[in-house]
């Protein structure tokens, strides 16, 4: 699943849920993003989804931040435009794939076509 939002949208979340079966000792991560301010934060390898979201929001640091969990064994990436508020967030099986696809998805929603990865992470 992909998410992206044009520049006029409000505060939005950047990374999506990855549907996979969790092992007994699952480790969760989350990435938070505030489209209004451009702030972002992440967490990884936390014992619960709630803890992962809490830390990502804290690391993001602004009231408009919203976080989404990346399930165990998943990788998430957030790319954004340097010149407008376009962004792309994806989850994938590998970090390289997450980074590549986040940039590609962001580029489809920016007038400049220039996006770069600002944060990415994988869970164990």
Image (spheres, rainbow, N blue to C red):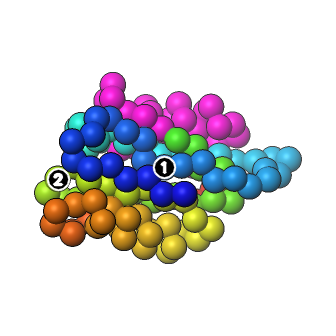
Could one spot residue 93 in this view of the protein?
yes
Residue 47 in magenta stretch:
yes
Q: In this rendering, is residue 99 above or below 76?
A: below
User: What is the quadrant of the C terminus in the image?
Assistant: bottom right
Find residue 116 and report its horizontal and vertical position in percent.
29, 66
Badge 2, how many Cα within 10 Å: few under 14, some, many 20+?
Answer: some
Can you give x and y, in whole percent of width and height, for residue 58 in the image? 43, 31
Q: Marks 1/2: CA distance?
A: 19 Å
Q: How many marks?
A: 2
* Residue 24 drawn at (x, y percent): 85, 47
91 or 117: nearer the viewer: 91
**Residue pictured at 74% horizontal, 55% vertical:** 20
Query: What's the residue at 23%, 38% (across, down)?
Result: 37
Where is mark 1, residue-wise?
15
Q: Which residue is mark 2?
A: 84
Residue 87 vertical placement versus 95 (above, below): above
Could you tell whether 95 is left or right of 89 in the image?
Answer: right
Decide which of tag 1 and tag 2 comes sooner along the chain.
Answer: 1
Closer to the camera in the image, 1 or 63: 1
Q: What is the magenta range?
A: 40-67
**Could you tell me which residue is drawn at 44 percent across and 52 percent down?**
3
User: Could you tell me which secondary element the residue under label 2 belongs to?
Assistant: loop
Q: Is residue 115 left or right of residue 117?
A: left
What residue occupies the far top of the structure in this picture? Answer: 63
Quadrant where the image shows the N terminus: bottom right
């Amino acid at each position: 699943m992909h998410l992206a939002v044009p520049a006029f949208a409000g505060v939005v979340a950047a990374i999506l849920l990855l549907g996979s079966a969790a092992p007994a000792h699952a480790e969760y991560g989350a990435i938070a993003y505030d489209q209004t301010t451009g702030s972002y934060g992440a967490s990884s390898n936390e014992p619960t989804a709630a803890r992962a979201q809490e830390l990502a929001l804290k690391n993001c640091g602004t009231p408009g931040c919203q976080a989404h969990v990346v399930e165990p064994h998943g990788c998430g990436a957030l790319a954004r435009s340097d010149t407008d508020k376009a962004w792309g967030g994806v989850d994938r099986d590998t970090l390289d794939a997450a980074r590549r696809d986040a940039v590609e998805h962001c580029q489809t929603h920016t007038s400049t076509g220039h996006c770069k990865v600002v944060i990415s992470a994988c869970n164990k």
